Image (spheres, rainbow, N blue to C red):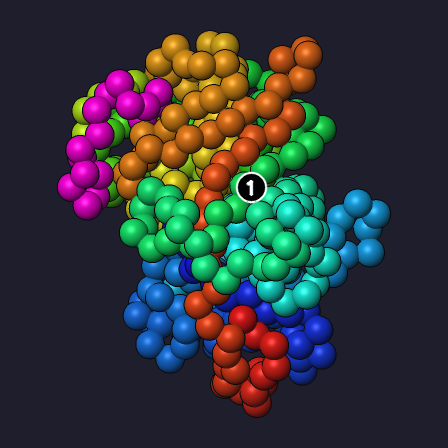
Amino acid sequence: MRGGTSKCWLFDAVDVDPLIEQAGGLDPILTSAFGSGDPRQLDGVGGGSSTTSKAAIVRRSSEPGIDIEYLFAQVAIGDRRVEWGSNCGNCATAIGLYALQTGLVAVDAARTTVRMRNRNTGAVLTAEIVTPGGKVPAEGNASVPGTSALGVPVALTFTDLATTPLLPTGSALDTIVLGGQRYRATMVDAGAPAALFAAADLGLAGAEQNATVGDHLPLLVALRRESALRMGLCTPDEPVSHAIPKVGVVGPPQDYCTGTGEYVAAEDYDISVRMVSMMAPHPAIGLTSAVAVAAAATVDGGVVADNARARRPGSLRLGTAAGVVDVDIIRSADGRVEAVSLHRAARRIAAAELFVTLPVAALSGSVR
């Protein structure tokens, strides 16, 4: 399925669970199915990019108030490995529609809400889909920045954000020194752990083309390493996940062109943001990163708040490499971020039977 700007293969847990012991875990199943180990992912269904090499194992939940549980997998491309430490909002968008189209969740007469638990992080999300007359839509005319494809409109909300501390370091502003240069950042845990750096400290504006951001990738990877240590995500003797913390740069609004040449005026958005995903600049922005940026914008004295234009209360417009993404922010009476909502689109692309290499002879059944 396509969810937002990602393509996600969704596996029914009923089909996958019996194969895990035989295969020696989920990793061999997914890396074989996706063709990982080859940058082209030629011998599998992966698309050779971070946004097209994603999967989720989906099941009904027995937890009260939760309809669906899912385990998200960011499947590596050139290596035969899987990152399990994060969540993906775009895939959650697809899972919400998938749950209705496959009968995992009962459909309401006018509008159906699917409440989901991400098992990687514990995050709770809701997907709201219009279901007129109790019918599940197969197609829609909703669009999102970063793709010209249309899909079923899905309102996706990250909930319960106030249950964990927003600032894992306890500071609105952290400074990392590398090579004698100081880099200011705001580190947050909302949607996903993220380290957001002031673009100016890297000699950037924050609204550059991704090719320019890519020139700074070694530095951003080094900053991710230091951020992971500060945020308590790893110890000095442990490797840093390529998936978390999310890392990116932010700057004030300015005129720019998207990767497809579309002109975006500075007055049309509130904050410039460019994110890195799995060792490459993200072509748009991951939804968990969008949530992190929105939450960080509420932190007085942080780099996001300091670079953002004065905005309408409860909303933020992100100027991304693919265009402007609108985010709604819900805050409690004491000012804490409780929930963040985004409007996305999803569409089912295929229902397939995938054959994977040994030690699993074949992976078949309800694989979508």
Q: For the residue labelled by badge 1, is the local secondary structure a helix, a strand or a loop?
A: strand
Q: Tag count in the figure?
A: 1
Residue 120 at x, y = what percent? 64, 50
Name the residue: 50% across, 10% down. 300
Of the pair 364 and 169, the residue shown nearer to us: 364
Q: Of all residues shown, which one is farthest toward the bottom?
A: 361
- Image quadrant in which you'd find residue 281: top left
Q: What's under tag 1, amino acid-wise?
A: Leu
Name the residue: 56% across, 51% down. 92
Residue highlighted by disc 1? 156
Name the residue: 61% across, 77% down. 366
Q: Quadrant of the C terminus?
A: bottom right
Name the residue: 68% across, 51% down. 109
Of the pair 176 and 355, the residue shown nearer to us: 355
On whether residue 363 falls in the magenta region, the answer is no
Residue 318 at x, y = what percent? 37, 29
Of the pair 149 and 309, the residue shown nearer to us: 149
Q: Is residue 106 visible?
A: yes
Residue 316 at x, y = what percent? 43, 23
Q: Is residue 15 left or right of residue 216?
A: right
Mark 1: give few (<14), some (14-19) or many (20+) Cα within 10 Å.
many
Q: Is residue 231 visible?
A: no
Residue 226 at x, y = what percent? 46, 33
Q: Is residue 179 left or right of residue 92?
A: left
Q: Is residue 203 left or right of residue 340?
A: left
* Above or below 277: residue 352: below
Magenta-tinted stretch: 257-273
Q: Is residue 306 left or right of residue 72?
A: left
